[in-house]
Image (cartoon, helix red, strand yellow):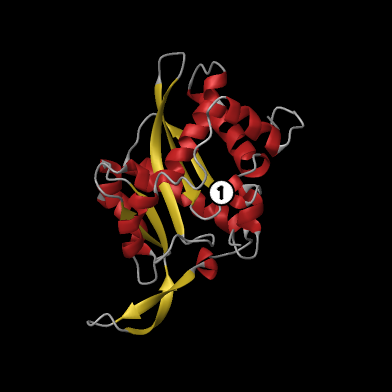
Amino acid sequence: MRADGHAVSDSTVERALRRRGLLLPVGFRADRRAWAKLRRRVFTNPPTVRNRVWQTDFSEFETTGGGIWRICAVIDYATKYCLAITVTPTATAADAVRCVEQAVIEAERILTLDDLREDRGLMDVVDDTDTVIGQAPAPIAVVSDNGPCFRSGTFAALFTGDDPLLRHVRTRVRSPQTNGVVERFFGTLKYEHLYRGLIGDGDALDMEVHRYRHIYNAIRPHQTLSNRTPDDAYRARNGGGT
């Protein structure tokens, strides 16, 4: 509503949603249980700081002209910031790589860094008995599903090298909720924006998804971010943590 120019408070929107039975119960988290196993593999607790965990996926959209297009996005888990979004006729490994590479470029641009490694965290180094013996820089965990493009050698090349910026974590099979932040983003993109008008072709779709990316990042407040925008949270010194 704010993107359309309406001056409206959060409480007014909440009341309207509640009257129509559209609000989830307080404290509800659809992906809480599914995250449990992933937490043990990637982090002890869900991250509250930017650039610790990213999520990526593809979503299909059919235009009125009959074409089916694939939208790829990369979302920062802690701040909900959409780092990159692309529209392609295919969902290949090369398409996924391009979107992740654009996310890295965007993160470096926003934070005015020459190398995003300057903003990553630390992880414990353990020996054979699981005893912590030190710490080392932690690559950003890029979470995806088990689609063919994410299992390919082309995509795996993003995570190689002596000092990788990124590491890959795939969700459990048939557990899309484990990648819930990016899945929620796609639902929001479609129901708040794309389904509200007629989109004729891929060029129009590309224009609209980038228009909404700006709305989502810079205008639309998020309750989980204390009603800040993802842009505000991502730029904050603590990267979204409270």
Amino acid type, callout 1: Tyr
User: Residue 1 is drawn in which quadrant?
Assistant: top right
Q: Give the residue drawn at x 54%, y 32%.
A: 209
**SS at circle 1:** loop
Dividing the image into 4 quarters, which one contains the C terminus? bottom right
Q: Which of 111 and 203 is in front in this view?
A: 111
* Count of numbered circles on the image: 1
**What residue does disc 1 label?**
81
Q: Where is residue 189 in the image (x, y as percent from the top left)?
A: 52, 32
Q: Where is residue 173 in the image (x, y as percent from the top left)?
A: 24, 45
Q: Give the residue drawn at x 60%, y 55%.
A: 234
Q: Does residue 133 appear to the left or right of 221 in the view shown?
A: left
Q: How crowded is mark 1: few (under 14 residues within 10 Å), some or many (20 or more)?
A: many
Q: Give the residue drawn at x 39%, y 42%.
A: 57
Residue sitting farthest toward the top: 65
Specify whether residue 86 is in view. no
Residue sitting farthest toward the right: 7
Q: Where is residue 54 in the image (x, y as percent from the top left)?
A: 45, 53
Q: Against 98, is 5 above or below?
A: above
Q: Give the residue drawn at x 34%, y 57%.
A: 36
Specify whether residue 109 is in view. yes
Q: Does residue 242 appear to the left or right of 123 in the view shown?
A: right
Q: Where is residue 144 in the image (x, y as percent from the top left)?
A: 35, 48
Q: Against 76, is 10 above or below?
A: above
Q: Does residue 133 appear to the left or right of 219 in the view shown?
A: left
